[in-house]
Image (tube, helix red, strand yellow):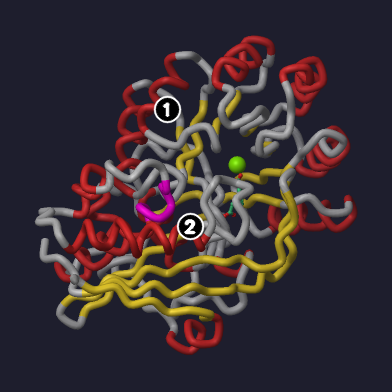
Amino acid sequence: MKLPSRLVLHLLHMPLRFPFETSFGRVTQQETILVEAVGDGVSGWGEVPASAQPHYSSETVVTASYVIREFLAPGLFASRIKSPADCPALFASVRGHSMAKAGVESALWDLEARRRGVPVSKLYGATRREIESGVSLGIDPLPALMKRVEDFAARGYRRIKLKIKPGWDVKPLAEARRRLGAAFPLTADANGAYKPSDTAHLRGLDRFHLDYLEQPLGHEDLADHAELARKLRTPICLDESITSADLARNAVRMKACRVVNIKPARVGGPSNAIEIHDFCRKARIPVWCGGLLETGVGRLHNVAIAGLPGFTKPGDISGSDRYYDPDVIDEPVVVSASGTIALRSRPGIGAEVRQDVLKRRRVERIVLKAR
Ligand code: OSB
Ligand code: MG
């Protein structure tokens, strides 16, 4: 591959169509960075969906733009990497900052795919033509939430996930299960809001036959998850805990989870996401692709990665219209009546960034070049 001549960081404030509430807080606007890698007049796009607050992870859009500007971009321009797949090794001397790394690496993959005239999904190794779509529903008053549950099921979505926290679990899950029927794939995501002392209560959630329970305990609590897993019938899926391929291996070996949520942004980019996928596939651990309220740019990278064969469960990849109106891409992500999203055949991520939306939502633009 040829290095880009510059990286442009576009910091966007994207209003959400509905406030989104999890156990760690409520947001009405997503702050995200689009990373544009420019070479020979071609632009490749990636995204850093870090948000404004360090609640989901320790990163924010401000830490990410700082780390890209001071460390990742200079490292990239001084390098002679042969492929975007070399990014994890190139960036290894920077500890953490996975979302910053993921944004840069994914922009390079899109640039490379566009230069070669192939879809980025092909470079990632996707084998599917379409993926199954699921949706993540935030904490909301019960009547409004149940209306959404029915609405997304009626629109064909293949799996519904409810955000839960102590004091907000039995009631919404019971109501959702009653409305969806016994067989519909229903899951719950606590974003780490419970403690090991809640084990008896969490065992009570077994009666809702969830496909899995996502990140019930703290992000560093692998041994506690392993112990909880022995006491629940419901499989545990880890999200926040799995920040690297090494942690995925350790979590699986410890039996801390039976399912893994792969978010390319959380694990440091597409190459690490693929490495975790490959490991889990060998270990017969089903994986699914999570999300972080990505705009169309990050969403299309996620769609492409979810096309790999080990992504056997519907993930959190919803249509563009779930969060944004309009999205930043010219051809929004659309979920079919049967709950699927088609992989794109156009080069790169398969869409162009809408300059009108970019200009309207952009609060800062930073150009980074070789020094
Ligand atoms: O835990 O999966 C999560 C959104 C923000 C932060 C954390 C999470 C989420 C979601 C929504 O569940 C995923 C999406 O639709 O992009
Ligand atoms: Mg989660």
The quadrant the C terminus occupies is bottom left
Query: Is residue 69 visible to us here?
Result: yes
- Mark 1 vs mark 2: in front: 2
Determine the secondary structure under disc 2. helix
Name the image quarter holding residue 195. top right
> Left or right of 62: which side holds 275?
left
At label 1, counting other C-alpha atoms closer than 10 Å, the crowd grade (few under 14, some 14-19, many 20 or more) is: some
Task: Specify the amino acid type for callout 2.
Answer: Thr
Residue 63 badge:
2
State which region is magenta. Answer: 97-102
At label 2, counting other C-alpha atoms closer than 10 Å, the crowd grade (few under 14, some 14-19, many 20 or more) is: some
Q: Measured from the top left, where is residue 262 in percent x and y?
A: 45, 40
Q: Measured from the top left, where is residue 249 in percent x and y?
A: 38, 23
Residue for point 42% across, 27% down = 247
Residue for point 41% across, 42% down = 96
Q: Measured from the top left, where is residue 337 in percent x and y?
A: 58, 61
> Left or right of 39: which side holds 8?
right
Residue 247 badge:
1
Determine the secondary structure under disc 1. helix
Task: Specify the amino acid type for callout 1.
Answer: Leu
Whether residue 46 is situated above or below residue 42 in the rendered picture = above
Q: Determine the quadrant in which ligand 2 lies.
A: top right
